[in-house]
Amino acid sequence: MKKIFSFLVVLILSTTMFGITNAKQKVTLLMDWFPQGNQSGFWQAQFDNQYHDDLEIIIKPGGPKVNTTTAVASGQVEFGLQASDSVMLANSKGAGLKGIFVSLNHVPYTLVYHPNTGVNSVKDLDGRPFAVKIGVTYWKWVKHKYGLNKVKEFPLTGDLGLFARTPQQFQQGYSIFLPARLDAKNVPNEQITVESLGYRPYSVLFTSDKLIKENPALVQAVVDRLSISFHKSLVDPKPTRDFILSKSKKVNVEIHNNALELMKADFLPKDWSKIGCQDPQRWVEVANQMKEVNVLPADFDPHQSYDTSFKKGCFK
C-alpha cells in the first residue's frame, strides 16, 4: 500500500509542473511584427522545443494589424512583445500587464532622410512630409521636444519607392533594417536615431498580472528558456536566419547579418548573460517623457508595469 501511495505522489508531482495536469504546457508568444532578425532569440526558443518535455513555446508572428497588448490583456495569448511605452499606455487604461524580459535595450526607431537636402539636425526636418505610424508615442515626444510643428504626417505603408522618389520626405523605420534595405536598392539615405534624441523605450516581452499571480513557475520557465535561446541564437545564428529569410521577402542574408551585428554592438548587453535584464529607472524615464506629452496621467506609477524577479543575475 505504501509503495502504491508513493508512486501516486511521484506521478502527481511530475504531472503538475507549472500548475497544470498535462505532461507538456504550451504557451504562445505573440511578436510585434513579421519574422525578422531582432526576434531570433524567440524563434530559437521554438526550435528548441524538441529538447524539452515540460514546456512548448509557440511563436506567433505579428504585423501592422496586430495589437500585442490587447491580445495578452484579453487572454488570447500568454505573452507578447512590444515597446515598453506601449505596455505602460495599455496599463494606464487598466490592461494589467508587466514586462518580464528585455529583448533590445531600446527600440531601434529611426528617422531616415535623403542626404544633401539641408538636414543638419532633427529640427531641419520640420515642414517636410513624414511617413509614420500615426499616433506612435515616440513621435509625439520628439515633436514636443524639438518643436517640429509643421511636419506633414501621412500613414506609413513601407513603400520605399515613394521615399526614393521624394527627396524632401523622411520616413520612420528600424535603424537595424531600413537603411540597409535602402542601400540594397541603391537609394542614398542618412538617419537620425530616436535613441540619440533621448527617447529609449525597451523592446520587452510582457505577460499579464493574472498569469504571474496564478502561475509564476510558468513565467519563470519561459524566461529561463529565453535566456538560453537568445545566447544560442547569437552563437549559431544560421537556423533562425534561414527560417526568417524563408518568411521575409524584404530581407536578404546580408541585411539580416548586418542587423545581428548592429544588435550585438548597440542593442544588447556586452555580457550576454544579462540579456533580458531591465532597469527600473528606464521605465521611470520613459514614463516621465510620456507624461510630458500627456500620453500618461501625471499620477501613473511606472513600477506597476514591470517585474524584475524572473530574470536572474541582473543586480549582482
Image (tube, grey):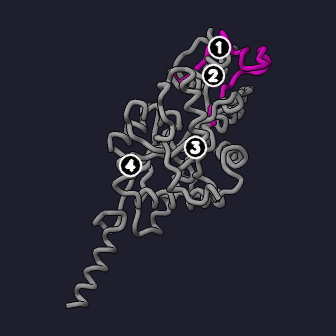
Please name the amino acid that badge 4 sits on: Glu
Disc 1 target residue: 148
**Nearer-N-terminus badge (4/3):** 4
Relative image position of residue 142 (x, y in whole percent) = 63, 22
Mark linked to residue 142: 2
Viewer-side residue, 1 vs 259: 1
Residue type, label 2:
Val
- Residue 127 magenta: yes
What kind of element bears circle 2? helix
Region of the chain picked out in magenta, as a range? 108-134
Asked if residue 63 is among those painted magenta in the image, a careful observer would answer no
Dot label at residue 105: none
Q: Residue at x 46, y 59 (%)?
A: 220
Q: Mark yes or no: residue 91 visible.
A: yes
Secondary structure of the residue carrying numbered label 4: loop
Q: Nearer the viewer, mark 3 or mark 2?
A: 3
Residue 78, labelled with which disc?
Answer: 4
Q: Mark 2 vs mark 1: which is more N-terminal?
A: 2
Location of mark 3 (residue): 280
Answer whether labels 2 and 1 touch (C-beta < 8 Å): yes
Q: Looking at the image, which is closer to me, 26 or 279?
A: 279
In percent of width and height, residue 195 lies at 67, 33
Label 3 and label 2: CA atoms lie apart by 22 Å
- Number of labels in the image equals 4
Q: Residue at x 62, y 13 (%)?
A: 129
Q: Is disc 3 placed on a helix, strand or loop? A: helix
Q: Earlier in the sequence, mark 1 or mark 4?
A: 4
- Viewed as shown, does residue 6 lie left or right of 220? left
Query: Residue at position x 71%, y 43% from top?
Result: 266
Image quadrant where residue 194 sits: top right
Amino acid on which disc 1 is placed = Leu
13 relative to 169 in the view: left or right:
left
